Image: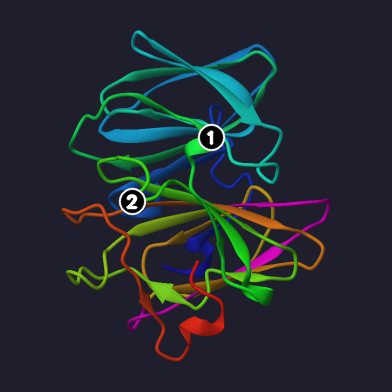
Amino acid sequence: MTSTDLHLPRGATANAQYAVDIDPKLAGWTHSSLRVVELAPGGSHTFTTGDSEWIVLPLEGGCTVQIDDNAFQLLGRDNVFADVTDFVYAPRDNRVQIASGAGGRFALAGAKCERRLPARYGPAPEVPVEERGSGTCARRVRNFASADSFDCDTLIAVEVVTPGGNWSSYPPHKHDEHRPGEESQLEEIYYFEIDGPNGLGYQRVFPSREGGSDLLAEVRSGDAVLVPDGWHGPSIAQPGHDMYYLNVMAGPGEAREWRICFHPDHVESTGGYR
């Protein structure tokens, strides 16, 4: 894919329903999806999950999520830099309504799946938070739907907050081949927000094979980057501006697992991965 295909600036996929709308057809792959819905005070949004499972994740504000006869109240948060948030899992083949009295912005992380798991609430206090790396590679990882923290069929999703001036998603790594016990094949979406006015960051993706994905992009709040294949990292935060990204991953493998391969020219001890 070209750099134009991989970097989706804010508004590039917007439509009447969503500020961000990335589905497998647009991305040119088979599983991973991401939507961001913006609700005015008193607003609501209804969608059908179809052949995918979804997590409703507040980016800003709280909401009520109605799935069949189940109603889940999400307290949400002021913004993505404030703290972890609670969330709701919505199974495939369902109708979902999101309503917000005060308004807000809500991410819908999705993945095509086979199993229909029960609708569930994910409490914020139960989200594993990991301080990863050190020095200029230090960052905070919120493993709200990592492969070993929350049960989904195929969907894997985490949040990362990188302090201004630091690198994350480093060393460069990949997950574009199915190699049992060593590497899993996963399509990945990065959705970015940058703290403070005029903040920016940089994202690198480079080929792991001839003709593979190649990108060096300046990213700002509301941008997304697609990683269908290739080495990805670092993600670089502008000094003075913390960088947030939401990672959404899924793939065709039978096992739901996140196994990665590090670039041989980089050393893992430089700060830890992601």
Depicted 214 relative to depicted 274: above or below:
below
Please, what secondary structure does the residue beneath circle 2 have? loop
**Amino acid type, label 2:** Ala
Q: Residue at x 27, y 28 (%)?
A: 92
Q: Is residue 231 magenta?
A: no
Mark closer to the chain start, 1 or 2: 1
Q: Residue at x 73, y 61 (%)?
A: 200
Depicted 34 relative to depicted 231: above or below:
above
Is 73 situated left or right of 257 in this image? right
- Does the image show residue 213? no
> Which residue is identified by label 2?
147
- 119 and 132: which is toward the camera: 132
Which mark is in front, 1 or 2?
1
Q: Residue 6's x, y, as percent?
A: 49, 62
Q: Residue at x 69, y 64 (%)?
A: 201
Q: Residue furthest top?
A: 69
Please, what secondary structure does the residue beneath circle 1 have? helix
Labelled disc at residue 181: none
Q: Residue at x 53, y 64 (%)?
A: 4
Q: Quadrant of residue 182?
A: bottom left
Q: Residue furthest front?
A: 125
Q: Quadrant of residue 105?
A: top right
Which segment is the magenta one? 191-211
- 90 and 133: which is toward the camera: 133
**Amino acid type, label 1:** Ala
Depicted 138 relative to depicted 190: above or below:
below
- How far apart in space, not on screen, are marks 1 and 2 (Cα)? 17 Å
